[in-house]
Amino acid sequence: MKLYVTDLYRVEMRYPLDDVQIDTLYSLYQPLIGMNATHLYMMLVMEGKRMRRFIAPCPLSRLTSYMSMSVMDMEKALRSLEAIGLVKTYVKHENDITQYIYRLYAPLSLKAFFKNQILSSLLQLSLSEDDFQKTVQYFKISLENLDGYEDITARFQDVFTIQHSPPKTRLLKYNEDLIHQTTQDVKIDYDYDLLYQSLADYQVNRSLLSQDDLKYATELAYVYHVDALTLAGIMKDAMESQGINRSRMKQAIQKYFDVSQTSQLQEVYHKQPLQFQTSDQTSSPLVLHMKYLDSLTPYDLLKDKQGGKEPVYHDLMIVETLMVQLGLKPAVVNVLIEYVLGKNNNRLSKRYCEAIGASWARKNIQTAMDAYRELMNQSTPEQSKEEEVSSSSSQSQVSSQELMDLLNQLKEGQL
């Protein structure tokens, strides 16, 4: 909302800032919000103290004059304070008069600030590595080594005694109106409905995820631009029997971000290079299907599996990772896609895909037929024999289900 110097304001604050909070404001918040916003916050703190004695609204021109700041700059600074969780703004329009209430919140504690993945990540991005380490070191407590010292601190009962006098005993009651410090965490807009639905689709046990786990995950997702569907897949892969492995999840999110930044989904649109395409001239269903996979990009194959709809970004990123980081060829990835979808109830599992893909990369598998044979070797019992597959039609394309049927037949020793 546009501000005018004639608008009125009042400031509410629960408690004065202590020295640690002021240090936190200047050392941790100022690199994020800038000098103007920090200056405005401290000015509002002083106004809050004054208005506790003289409760009367003032025009915004008072603030602009004291800070030598334009209304436009003040509006920008105020939005920064609101976004970072230091100020809440309320407005009322009455009798052609606009009045604001600025409710101040104390900076987060040091532990809460560095635990917040959004704020701590932004601070690292705002400062050089050297300055960031100096800032962290400033807040660390330097304690004397107590080896050789004896604790001689007096105990409470060594000094004080409590004598009960029933007639004069007074019960102290908690007064809810007593002033106390309040803080406000950073709020982000995230598609929680899609995240919860996707976690359910992946059959993730929600009882193993605390609210703090979900907050941690969505903060990371916000910092690294991870959509809800992709985040659900990453969380699924990071789940363990006792809950989610935060370290593994963070590494996966950072890895996803690195791939998305460097590749921007380029490899998924490539077809199998000519020198690695199927050269067999027979017309068996298997050979025809391998040639079919040679002719498709992984993007086209995923789109076909989606019934012609745009593939979800989560699946595309899994494929992009296989091609960029493992160096798998397009047709090899196509075989892997069909196999994993058939084995995993039409869902691409990142961990499953990468486990197979890494094995194929080490074995230097570069053609669709080699990938198929590798699956055959893994699926066929030792006593089974491979025989030639005959075809009744040399022109028809073989579906992915037929490929799965071939694998199943091989497993049962029927081919």
Image: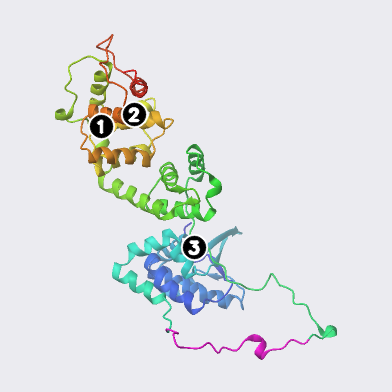
Q: Nearer the viewer, residue 247 or 17?
A: 247
Q: Is residue 290 above or below residue 156?
A: above
Residue at the spot 62% in from the left edge and 86% down from the top edge = 155
Which residues lie in the magenta part?
145-163
Mark 2 lies on a secondary structure that is: helix
Magenta highlight on residue 117: no
Residue type marked 1: Val
**Mark 1 vs mark 3, CA separation in Å:** 49 Å
Q: Does residue 289 appear left or right of residue 140 in this picture?
A: left
Q: Earlier in the sequence, mark 1 or mark 3?
A: 3
Residue type marked 3: Gly
| Image depth: mark 3 or mark 2 in front | 2
Q: Earlier in the sequence, mark 3 or mark 2?
A: 3
Residue type marked 2: Ser
**Where in the figure is residue 396, as x and y percent of width and height?**
28, 13
Which residue is identified by label 2? 379
Return the mark for residue 85.
3
Name the quadrant containing residue 93: bottom right
Name the quadrant containing residue 363: top left
Return the mark for residue 332.
1
Q: Does residue 334 appear left or right of residue 78 in this picture?
A: left
